[in-house]
Image: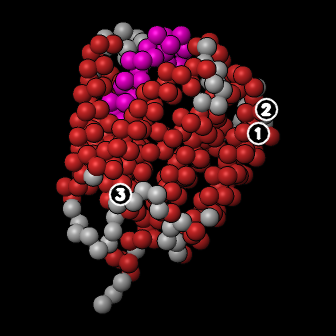
Amino acid sequence: MLRTYADLTKFGIVVFSVITGLAGYATGFLVENPFDWKAILNTLLGIYFLSSGSLALNQVQEWKLDQKMPRTAKRPIAAGKVKPAAAGILAVGFIAVGLDFLFTVQPVAGWVGLVSMLLYNGPYTMWWKRRWAFAAVPGAIPGALPVTIGYAAANPDILNPESIYLFLVMFLWQMPHFWVLAIKYKDDYAQGGIPVLPVVAGVDKTLYQIGLWTFVYVGVALAAPMFVQASWMFLLVTGPICFKIMQEFYRYYKSHGTERWFAFFMWLNISMLIFLIIPVVDKWNFLFTHSN
């Protein structure tokens, strides 16, 4: 039962969203404000329920499509373990609970959460994904918003450089992240009739796009001092990680997408979390280094 619930709500992705939301909250929190554990907890619960509900609703919307692809055919609704109506009720309930938590903490966080859910379960799921090879680009907007939700819960000024940097890191990361998987499971997507980039344009053009977006992603990470507070931690960590990402991409590219895909994929994922955590460490290291 727990496994079915975890698969329906894509628990691993939800945990990822909660962690990025926490990084956003910690970066956006104003030092002069009183610390409020309840606000943090409500923010994380809001992101958890909203993400879980949105991802479950996505499976309700796509269960017939999921049945066509071996990679997704074992999902709970597609496999007949959960009725679409029951999953839909759970999804809508979770979305409502999540939004209630977020609006209670900070209305801006609630509105950002609502926009994220509507974009993902609306245009992306129902239109872009089914008709456009570059659907991953606008689809990355709702995927990047959990960190903005967390930031907004602590600081409603989400258009400042700090918030923009966090959003850009998560936004740019998603294109190479998704297209690597799209190459790996190209035949599945073709069988399901989903026009992902490798299916429509071929592997070579997809590798070119992965390289382009990876280069911009690394560039934004290296430009972090223009957006956020950065110190020795930034210098010590960011440069080597960016080098490693480009090295793994080069190896992946040279193999025409057949080798070291997982190494490149994992370095992308690890780097994204590190690039979000570095501003938190740099902002709050005074708590550990300051002496009276």
Colour basis: secondary structure
Q: State the separation of the CA atoms marked 1 and 3.
A: 37 Å
Label 2 Cα neighbours within 10 Å, binned few <14 / some 14-19 / many ≥20: some
Q: Residue 267 versus residue 151: which sits nearer the camera?
A: 151
Mark 1 and mark 3 residues within 8 Å of each other at the beta carbon:
no
Query: Can residue 22 be spotted in the picture?
Result: no
Q: State the separation of the CA atoms marked 3 and 2.
A: 42 Å
**Residue 41 at x, y = what percent?**
24, 51
Q: Secondary structure at mark 3?
A: loop
Q: Quadrant of residue 235?
A: bottom right
Indicate which disc, 1 or 3, sits on the residue closer to the N terminus: 3
- Residue 204, numbered label: 2
Position of residue 259 in the picture relative to residue 52 (left or right):
right
- Residue 290, numbered label: none
Q: Residue 189 versus residue 106: which sits nearer the camera?
A: 106
- Residue 208, numbered label: 1
Label 1 Cα neighbours within 10 Å, binned few <14 / some 14-19 / many ≥20: few
Label 3 Cα neighbours within 10 Å, binned few <14 / some 14-19 / many ≥20: some
Q: State the separation of the CA atoms marked 1 and 2.
A: 6 Å
Position of residue 55 in the picture relative to residue 99 (left or right):
right
Mark 1 and mark 2 residues within 8 Å of each other at the beta carbon:
yes
In the rendered image of this protein, does residue 78 appear above or below residue 147?
A: above
Is 67 one of the magenta-colored residues? Answer: yes
Task: Write the residue at 59% across / 33% down.
Answer: 136
Stretch of the chain drawn in magenta: 51-72
Indicate which disc, 3 or 2, sits on the residue closer to the N terminus: 3
What kind of residue is marked 1? Tyr
Which residue is the site of mark 3?
A: 156
